[in-house]
Amino acid sequence: MSILRWGWNAYCEAIWKDAERANTVPARVVAQGRGIWRVEGDFEERSAEVSGKLRLAADEGGDWPAVGDWVAVELRDGGSAAVIQEVLPRRSCFLRKMAGKKLVEQVIAANVDTAVLVSALDGDFNPRRVERYLAQCWQSGAKPVIVLNKADACENLREKEEQTENVAMGVPVCLISAKTGQGFSELEAHFAPGQTLVLLGSSGVGKSTILNRLMGHAIQEVEEVRESDSRGRHTTTARQIFVLPGGPLLMDTPGLRELQLWDADEGISHAFADIDAFAAQCRFTNCGHETEPGCAVWKAIRSGALDEDRLANWRKLQREQEFLRRKIDPEARRNEKQRLKQLLRSVRKMYRDREKG
């Protein structure tokens, strides 16, 4: 076995040599699920556990080893056991807020070169969800490619393709059918030996079927989606990297019921660059794009250059980020409290002045 098979390159070598790591060897986390890690390097794949030191030092969520991570492992018991001592710095990291009420980040994939964002051309098709995935992808540092699957079963194919291209902002859009093989040559043109890709999307969009076709044989189970709402069930329960024919590395992930953004301000700005460009032309620099005169954003909506639903989604993602900042950033929380106090003072003053008048 060779670590080069898993994408080890000059960048990884430089990171490794940047610090002393006695009694450890480099490896990659090639599978992860329910507190179990599988690693491989210049040795055969094996299970690994996290060292007590790393367990104590790691914060919840983000600092835990994730699939795609490069790690320093100590081989014990004659090489049959592996203990992860350190997670090496990540080149890219796809995050989300962990599902539920707890405010914790979750690493979905690490050290990814290209994120393949899969959306289905059935009743679950949603351009707003594509925008959300793009925002977090740009934040991660990976390059996105949008894949529209189930083209063989879509009647208004061109209409949905245009809707996707309108939100893609120059990101490649591939029309495929995992069932028939349509469009796979175009998709594989974005792959390269040694590069790491990740399949991301909701349950039922066909990620496992795409992986099976790319591998050339059935490697993941697949399930039919419900006819009533085109929703699927989780068939992939662990995150795992597969070596495709020719050498690209493809990471399969469980379908996401929801993708709540985490620290994605720059990603939102990139994904909605058109709105930022229109906003720069507004008469007032602090324009809220509501009813202000000279608002270039609403001018673009009235002319058809901008979709009002896209603006609404941009506002929604901005609100989510502001809420997250207030919850996890004490200074932002204090600023928000101060803003609310000033607002209440202004309202009280307005009512006092009205009573005097």
Image (cartoon, helix red, strand yellow):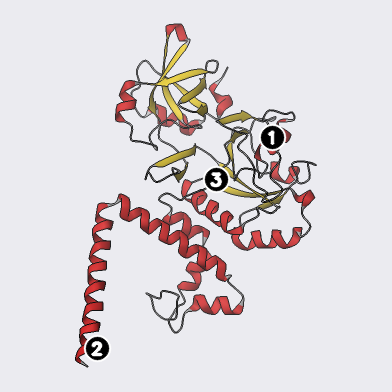
Q: Is 106 on the left or on the right of 113, as rendered?
A: left
Q: State which quadrant residue 188 falls in.
A: top right
Within 10 Å of disc 1 (Cα), the crowding (few <14, some 14-19, many 20+) is some
Residue that sits furthest to the bottom in the current view: 357
Identify the secondary structure beneath mark 1: loop
Q: Earlier in the sequence, mark 2 or mark 3?
A: 3
Within 10 Å of disc 3 (Cα), the crowding (few <14, some 14-19, many 20+) is some
Q: Earlier in the sequence, mark 1 or mark 3?
A: 1
Residue under pointer 2: 354
Q: Name the foreground residue: 101 vs 272.
A: 101
Q: Is residue 171 above or below residue 68?
A: below
Q: CA distance from mark 1 to mark 2?
A: 66 Å
Instruction: Name the residue type under label 1.
Output: Val
Q: Earlier in the sequence, mark 1 or mark 2?
A: 1
Residue under pointer 3: 257
What residue is rendered at 55% in x and 41% in y?
A: 113
Residue 111 percent coordinates (x, y): 49, 37
Identify the secondary structure beneath mark 3: loop
Classify the position of the C terminus by image quarter. Answer: bottom left
Instruction: Name the residue type under label 2.
Output: Arg
Q: Name the foreground residue: 76 vs 9.
A: 76
Q: Is 79 on the left or on the right of 230, as rendered?
A: left
Residue 53 percent coordinates (x, y): 30, 23
Q: Is residue 357 above or below residue 210?
A: below
Residue under pointer 1: 222
Q: Name the foreground residue: 257 vs 210.
A: 257
Instruction: Name the residue type under label 3.
Output: Arg
Q: CA distance from mark 1 to mark 3?
A: 17 Å
Identify the secondary structure beneath mark 2: helix
Which mark, residue 341?
none
Classify the position of the N terminus by image quarter. Answer: top right
